[in-house]
Structures are given as C-alpha cells and as structure tokens.
Amino acid sequence: MDRGMWVRVLNYVDSHIHEKISLCDLAEIAGYSPFYFSRLFAEAMGMPVTGYIRIRKLQHAIVSLLEGKKVLEVALLYAFDSHEGFTRSFTQLFGSTPSMLRKSLNTYTVPDYIVPEEKGRRSQMAGKQEEMEDSRQQLVYEVLRESLEEAGEGCCTEVEIVLLPEGGIKIRDNGRGIPLSEDLQASKEVLEKILSGRPVTNVEFSQMGDLVQAGLQTVNSLCESLKITVYRDGRKYQQDYIRGIPQHELFIDREKHASGTEIIMKPDTAIFGYGEFSEDKLRKWMEKQTSDRKELSVAIKRQENPAG
C-alpha cells in the first residue's frame, strides 16, 4: 500500500477508536480482500490488525482513566466486551491493572500513529540477528553514559555491570544519585521527566533509527521490565517499570548506604526477541570510553543461573 492509503487506514482506526473496528472495514478502505490486507498489515506493522487496534484503544484508555473515568466506563467507552476483558488486555500491555496505573501515573499523551515506510531500514533487516543485537547493546550503553557523565564530573569512581540470566542486566554506580527527596510528588515528577515512557510497537521501533543518545525514557520504553534504585542523602528510592509505565508509588525508605544508582532491566522480547547482552562488546565499549579515566574502576561479570 502507498503512504496515502496507510494514512487513511490508520486515521480511520483513531477516528473510530470508541467503536468496534473490524478487519473488513479496514480492508474495504484499503481496497483489498480481508485476507490479503491482513497479511500486508502484519508484514508492515509487525503485528496483526486486531493487535494494533487493541493497543491503540488501550493507549487512549489511559487518558480516559487519568481524567477520572471509572474502569467499567472506560471499558465500554472503547468497545471492549467486558470489564474483565479490558482489564486483562490492559494489564498484559502495561503491566499494571487500570486502577494501579491511575495511582502511579500523573500524565500520559497518546503517541501519534506511525505510517510504515515501504522500505524501512529495520523492516529490511528483520531476521538479521547481528543488527538486532547491536540495538539491544545500545540500550545498556545509554544507561552507562549517565554513569560516565557522573565520572566526568568527578562524582563517580566505581561502575559495576552484571549480566543476568534470561537476558537481563544490572548497572550500578557510586555517583551522586538522581536528585530525589522525601517530597513524594516532586520526586515522582523528577523520575517521570527522566524515565517514564510508554510501550513501543514494532513499527514505531522500526522507524526510530539509531538509538545513540536516545535517552533513558526511550530505553525504559523498550524494556519489558526496569527497576531503578537510587541511594541519596541517607534514603533509598525505588521504582519499577514495565514498558516505561511506573508500577506503583515511589518507594522511599531511610537506609544508610553510599550514594549511587542501580538499574536492573530486561529489553522487550516482543521487539528484540530472546537474547543476551554481549560481555565482550561491553568490555570493549567501556575500555574505549574510559581510556582516559584511570580513576574510574569498572567491573563486568556474569551471574549464572543458580544450580538446580
């Protein structure tokens, strides 16, 4: 399909977001049979038609929830068959129930729909494992840049990187820690500005380009789980995210601990597939970045699955 046809199809979805939208409706707009349109859509968007419609409805549903509408009201507003079905789909995508997310999220903006490119760079490279691994590696480089920036300002002397089982990774430094405080609302706003993201679809990812300097919000959005722990001024702050969405109120506790930041994250397998970070690439990248920083100690290790 050409770009104009994609715009008409995707615009139809958004303009009829409160209605039942069928495959036949969209196929008719595109001028194809339902079977052929379904195949074209899945190839271009990286997901079936029904999956895309569901994601768009759930993204819009967050805004309605934050406006104060009841969960059942929102479920009916976006044409879900039941309260239970809406809650189940919502939780699968965002990691939290509608009620929990409303408590932990202050604002949300529905992303614009993305028109797939006929020859998108990542669409062409689908199945090229090496390039996908490079994109996965770039996520951890973005986190490490924050530690290196602290080191460059003379505020961080140690960085520890632990490769975890099943594709996860932990990065810890002894920097100053993100400037959080016991003012819960102010701290939530700081974390939201730095980290809060949103679920990213395959087609959105395919058009992101290189992830260099993408920022922590993008990294968080591309992780199916991310936990940040900040130690600062005798307090411990902790927040969990799923695909960029906070999962609970910011946890604050008094704890005597050296200042620093720890991030544990796992890239979204729906985008990157199942794989692990390369220890060799991490070592080479860190050696290059720290060649003129002899005062910075870097430890990289692998945590194996416990026996049995």
Image: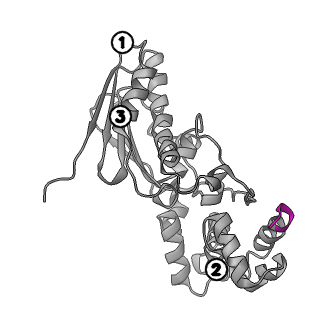
Q: Please check the rendered image and state whether residue 3 is part of the magenta-colored stretch, yes or no.
A: yes
Q: Percent from the top left, x then y, of residue 89?
A: 53, 75
Precedes in sequence: disc 3 or disc 1: 3
Mark on residue 73?
2
- How packed is label 1: few (under 14 Cα within 10 Å), some, or many (20 or more)? few
Q: Residue 119 appears in which quarter of the rendering? A: bottom right
Q: Tell me, yes or no, whether the two marked residues, 3 and 1, touch with CB atoms within 8 Å.
A: no
- Provide the residue span drawn in magenta: 1-5
Q: Which residue is mark 3?
A: 280
Q: Tell me, yes or no, whether the two marked residues, 2 and 1, touch with CB atoms within 8 Å.
A: no
Compute the Cα span from label 3 to label 1.
20 Å
Q: Residue at x 29, y 51 (%)?
A: 165
Precedes in sequence: disc 2 or disc 1: 2
Q: Which residue is mark 1?
A: 294
Kind of residue sitting beneath label 1:
Lys
Q: In the image, which is nearer the foreground, mark 2 or mark 1?
A: 1
Q: In the image, which is nearer the foreground, mark 3 or mark 1?
A: 3
Kind of residue sitting beneath label 2:
Glu
